[in-house]
Image (spheres, rainbow, N blue to C red):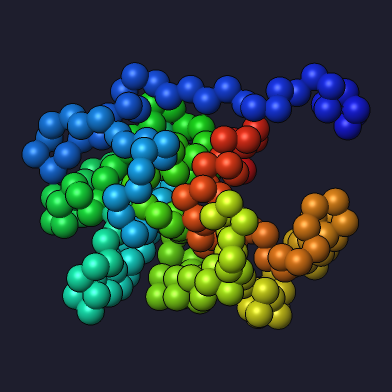
Amino acid sequence: ICMIAHVTARKMPTFHRHEEEKFFVNAEGRKESVPSIHDPPTRELSVVVPSYNEEDRLPLMMDEALDYLEKRQKRDPSFTYEVIVVDDGSKDQTTKVAMKYCKEYGNDKVRVLSLVKNRGKGGAVRMGVFSSRGKKILMADADGATKFADIEKVEEGLKNLQPWPNQMAISCGSRAHLEKDSIAKRSYFRTLLMYGFHFLVWFLCVKEIRDTQCGFKLLTREAALQTFSTLHIERW
Protein backbone atom coordinates (compact mmCIF):
# COMPACT_ATOMS: atom_id res chain seq x y z
CA ILE A 1 0.00 0.00 0.00
CA CYS A 2 2.83 2.39 0.88
CA MET A 3 4.55 1.71 -2.45
CA ILE A 4 1.33 2.33 -4.40
CA ALA A 5 0.75 5.57 -2.51
CA HIS A 6 4.33 6.66 -3.15
CA VAL A 7 4.06 6.02 -6.89
CA THR A 8 0.58 7.46 -7.47
CA ALA A 9 0.51 10.43 -5.09
CA ARG A 10 1.48 13.90 -6.26
CA LYS A 11 4.37 15.45 -4.35
CA MET A 12 2.73 18.88 -4.43
CA PRO A 13 -1.02 18.78 -3.71
CA THR A 14 -3.48 20.94 -5.61
CA PHE A 15 -4.58 24.00 -3.64
CA HIS A 16 -7.93 25.48 -4.62
CA ARG A 17 -9.57 28.59 -3.21
CA HIS A 18 -13.20 29.26 -4.17
CA GLU A 19 -13.94 32.70 -5.58
CA GLU A 20 -15.82 33.69 -2.40
CA GLU A 21 -12.79 32.67 -0.32
CA LYS A 22 -10.54 35.19 -2.04
CA PHE A 23 -12.15 37.94 0.02
CA PHE A 24 -12.97 38.69 3.63
CA VAL A 25 -15.69 41.08 4.79
CA ASN A 26 -14.36 44.05 6.74
CA ALA A 27 -15.99 45.79 9.70
CA GLU A 28 -17.92 48.08 7.33
CA GLY A 29 -19.34 45.13 5.41
CA ARG A 30 -17.17 45.65 2.32
CA LYS A 31 -15.19 42.90 0.61
CA GLU A 32 -11.40 43.09 0.65
CA SER A 33 -8.94 40.76 -1.03
CA VAL A 34 -7.17 38.39 1.33
CA PRO A 35 -3.38 38.76 1.56
CA SER A 36 -1.03 35.98 0.49
CA ILE A 37 1.68 34.20 2.43
CA HIS A 38 3.87 34.80 -0.63
CA ASP A 39 3.78 38.54 0.12
CA PRO A 40 6.35 40.12 2.48
CA PRO A 41 5.16 40.02 6.12
CA THR A 42 3.67 43.19 7.61
CA ARG A 43 2.84 41.92 11.12
CA GLU A 44 4.90 40.35 13.86
CA LEU A 45 2.33 37.65 14.60
CA SER A 46 -0.64 36.02 12.89
CA VAL A 47 -2.95 33.85 14.99
CA VAL A 48 -4.95 31.35 12.92
CA VAL A 49 -8.07 30.01 14.63
CA PRO A 50 -9.85 27.18 12.74
CA SER A 51 -13.49 27.11 13.81
CA TYR A 52 -16.35 24.75 13.05
CA ASN A 53 -19.65 25.31 14.88
CA GLU A 54 -17.85 27.20 17.65
CA GLU A 55 -20.34 29.98 18.40
CA ASP A 56 -20.42 29.01 22.09
CA ARG A 57 -16.73 28.41 22.80
CA LEU A 58 -15.14 30.95 20.46
CA PRO A 59 -15.94 34.05 22.60
CA LEU A 60 -14.04 32.70 25.61
CA MET A 61 -10.97 31.98 23.51
CA MET A 62 -11.12 35.31 21.66
CA ASP A 63 -11.59 37.33 24.85
CA GLU A 64 -8.56 35.69 26.42
CA ALA A 65 -6.39 35.97 23.30
CA LEU A 66 -7.22 39.58 22.48
CA ASP A 67 -6.84 40.67 26.09
CA TYR A 68 -3.32 39.22 26.09
CA LEU A 69 -2.41 40.63 22.67
CA GLU A 70 -3.71 44.12 23.44
CA LYS A 71 -1.80 44.28 26.74
CA ARG A 72 1.35 43.09 25.01
CA GLN A 73 0.98 45.74 22.34
CA LYS A 74 0.59 48.45 24.98
CA ARG A 75 3.81 47.29 26.65
CA ASP A 76 5.59 47.09 23.30
CA PRO A 77 4.11 49.37 20.59
CA SER A 78 6.37 47.75 17.97
CA PHE A 79 4.50 44.46 18.44
CA THR A 80 1.81 44.04 15.79
CA TYR A 81 -0.63 41.19 15.36
CA GLU A 82 -3.68 39.87 13.58
CA VAL A 83 -6.17 37.15 14.48
CA ILE A 84 -7.66 35.22 11.56
CA VAL A 85 -10.80 33.26 12.42
CA VAL A 86 -11.42 30.65 9.72
CA ASP A 87 -15.06 29.56 9.73
CA ASP A 88 -14.83 26.07 8.25
CA GLY A 89 -18.32 25.92 6.74
CA SER A 90 -20.10 26.15 10.10
CA LYS A 91 -23.83 25.58 10.36
CA ASP A 92 -24.22 27.88 13.36
CA GLN A 93 -23.42 31.57 13.97
CA THR A 94 -19.63 31.23 14.17
CA THR A 95 -19.01 33.90 11.51
CA LYS A 96 -21.46 36.31 13.14
CA VAL A 97 -19.80 35.86 16.53
CA ALA A 98 -16.32 36.37 15.06
CA MET A 99 -17.44 39.49 13.16
CA LYS A 100 -18.33 41.15 16.48
CA TYR A 101 -14.63 41.12 17.34
CA CYS A 102 -13.77 42.44 13.90
CA LYS A 103 -16.07 45.40 14.49
CA GLU A 104 -14.76 45.97 18.02
CA TYR A 105 -11.03 45.75 17.29
CA GLY A 106 -11.01 46.63 13.58
CA ASN A 107 -10.37 44.42 10.58
CA ASP A 108 -6.66 45.18 10.71
CA LYS A 109 -6.47 43.14 13.92
CA VAL A 110 -9.31 40.64 13.52
CA ARG A 111 -10.28 39.07 10.21
CA VAL A 112 -12.90 36.46 9.44
CA LEU A 113 -12.44 34.08 6.53
CA SER A 114 -15.59 32.08 5.77
CA LEU A 115 -15.09 28.89 3.76
CA VAL A 116 -17.72 27.85 1.24
CA LYS A 117 -17.82 24.29 2.54
CA ASN A 118 -16.30 22.31 5.37
CA ARG A 119 -12.73 21.27 4.51
CA GLY A 120 -11.60 19.82 7.82
CA LYS A 121 -9.22 21.27 10.38
CA GLY A 122 -6.15 20.82 8.20
CA GLY A 123 -7.80 22.60 5.29
CA ALA A 124 -9.07 25.42 7.51
CA VAL A 125 -5.66 25.99 9.09
CA ARG A 126 -4.00 26.01 5.68
CA MET A 127 -6.47 28.60 4.35
CA GLY A 128 -5.75 30.81 7.33
CA VAL A 129 -1.99 30.36 7.04
CA PHE A 130 -2.04 31.19 3.33
CA SER A 131 -4.01 34.38 4.14
CA SER A 132 -1.70 35.58 6.91
CA ARG A 133 0.62 38.59 7.16
CA GLY A 134 2.76 37.63 10.15
CA LYS A 135 6.48 36.94 10.44
CA LYS A 136 5.43 34.19 12.80
CA ILE A 137 2.20 32.21 12.59
CA LEU A 138 0.47 30.62 15.57
CA MET A 139 -2.14 27.87 15.30
CA ALA A 140 -4.65 28.08 18.17
CA ASP A 141 -7.80 26.02 18.71
CA ALA A 142 -11.14 27.81 19.06
CA ASP A 143 -12.05 25.87 22.20
CA GLY A 144 -9.32 27.56 24.22
CA ALA A 145 -7.81 24.22 25.24
CA THR A 146 -4.45 25.94 25.76
CA LYS A 147 -3.99 29.06 27.88
CA PHE A 148 -3.15 31.78 25.36
CA ALA A 149 -0.44 33.35 27.51
CA ASP A 150 1.49 30.11 26.97
CA ILE A 151 2.45 31.57 23.61
CA GLU A 152 5.48 32.88 25.47
CA LYS A 153 6.60 29.29 26.05
CA VAL A 154 6.42 28.32 22.38
CA GLU A 155 8.11 31.60 21.48
CA GLU A 156 10.94 30.69 23.82
CA GLY A 157 11.08 27.25 22.20
CA LEU A 158 11.34 28.86 18.77
CA LYS A 159 14.08 31.18 20.00
CA ASN A 160 16.05 28.23 21.38
CA LEU A 161 16.09 26.62 17.91
CA GLN A 162 18.17 29.45 16.45
CA PRO A 163 19.97 29.69 14.11
CA TRP A 164 17.07 28.66 11.89
CA PRO A 165 18.13 26.90 8.65
CA ASN A 166 16.65 28.98 5.82
CA GLN A 167 14.58 30.79 8.48
CA MET A 168 12.55 27.61 9.03
CA ALA A 169 11.54 26.56 12.54
CA ILE A 170 8.47 25.15 14.31
CA SER A 171 7.77 25.15 18.05
CA CYS A 172 5.04 22.78 19.28
CA GLY A 173 3.02 23.21 22.44
CA SER A 174 2.55 20.16 24.65
CA ARG A 175 -0.01 18.97 27.18
CA ALA A 176 1.92 15.79 27.97
CA HIS A 177 2.40 16.98 31.55
CA LEU A 178 -1.39 16.78 31.96
CA GLU A 179 -1.55 13.17 30.75
CA LYS A 180 -2.07 11.62 34.20
CA ASP A 181 -5.09 13.82 34.86
CA SER A 182 -6.60 13.06 31.45
CA ILE A 183 -6.10 9.30 31.89
CA ALA A 184 -8.07 9.40 35.14
CA LYS A 185 -11.06 10.82 33.23
CA ARG A 186 -10.90 8.40 30.28
CA SER A 187 -12.28 4.90 29.92
CA TYR A 188 -9.80 2.01 29.70
CA PHE A 189 -10.66 1.59 26.02
CA ARG A 190 -9.91 5.24 25.18
CA THR A 191 -6.70 5.07 27.19
CA LEU A 192 -5.65 1.98 25.22
CA LEU A 193 -6.40 3.77 21.94
CA MET A 194 -4.41 6.79 23.11
CA TYR A 195 -1.32 4.73 23.93
CA GLY A 196 -1.66 2.82 20.66
CA PHE A 197 -1.83 6.05 18.68
CA HIS A 198 1.15 7.53 20.54
CA PHE A 199 3.18 4.40 19.79
CA LEU A 200 2.39 4.54 16.06
CA VAL A 201 3.32 8.22 15.88
CA TRP A 202 6.56 7.53 17.77
CA PHE A 203 7.41 4.46 15.66
CA LEU A 204 6.47 5.80 12.22
CA CYS A 205 6.79 9.58 12.44
CA VAL A 206 8.45 11.66 15.15
CA LYS A 207 10.14 10.64 18.37
CA GLU A 208 11.03 14.01 19.89
CA ILE A 209 7.48 15.47 20.16
CA ARG A 210 5.46 13.94 22.99
CA ASP A 211 2.14 15.63 22.14
CA THR A 212 1.60 15.87 18.39
CA GLN A 213 -2.12 16.61 18.81
CA CYS A 214 -1.80 19.86 20.73
CA GLY A 215 -3.29 22.59 18.52
CA PHE A 216 -0.86 25.24 19.77
CA LYS A 217 2.01 25.48 17.28
CA LEU A 218 4.20 28.43 16.32
CA LEU A 219 5.89 28.55 12.92
CA THR A 220 8.14 30.98 11.13
CA ARG A 221 6.56 32.29 7.93
CA GLU A 222 9.04 30.34 5.83
CA ALA A 223 8.32 27.09 7.69
CA ALA A 224 4.57 27.63 7.40
CA LEU A 225 4.80 28.09 3.63
CA GLN A 226 6.92 24.97 3.22
CA THR A 227 4.75 22.86 5.55
CA PHE A 228 1.30 23.79 4.31
CA SER A 229 2.26 23.83 0.63
CA THR A 230 2.86 20.08 0.88
CA LEU A 231 -0.18 19.22 3.02
CA HIS A 232 -2.13 16.39 1.36
CA ILE A 233 -4.65 15.52 4.09
CA GLU A 234 -7.15 18.21 5.06
CA ARG A 235 -9.52 16.27 7.30
CA TRP A 236 -7.61 16.09 10.56
On the image, the x and y values in percent for residue 150 come to 46, 75
Q: Quadrant of residue 20?
A: top left
Query: Front-most of 162 and 233?
Result: 162
Hey, which residue is sitting farthest left in the picture?
A: 28
Query: Front-most of 56 and 135?
Result: 135
Residue at image position (13%, 43%) is: 27
On the image, the x and y values in percent for residue 213 come to 64, 58
The answer to whether residue 203 is seen in the rendering is yes
Query: Front-most of 212 and 168?
Result: 168
Q: Is residue 78 left or right of residue 54?
A: left
Eyeballing the image, is 10 above or below 115? above
Query: Front-most of 206 and 54?
Result: 206
Q: Is residue 202 left or right of residue 18?
A: right
- The quadrant the C terminus occupies is top right
Eyeballing the image, is 126 above or below 31? below
Q: How many marks?
A: 0
Residue at image position (44%, 54%) is: 137
Q: Is residue 199 left or right of residue 58?
A: right
Eyeballing the image, is 115 above or below 154? above
- The quadrant the N terminus occupies is top right
The answer to whether residue 100 is seen in the rendering is no
Residue at image position (40%, 75%) is: 149
Q: Quadrant of residue 169?
A: bottom right
On the image, the x and y values in percent for residue 63 come to 28, 66
Q: Is residue 213 left or right of residue 64?
A: right
Eyeballing the image, is 92 above or below 15? below
On the image, the x and y values in percent for residue 209 come to 71, 65
Residue at image position (30%, 34%) is: 34
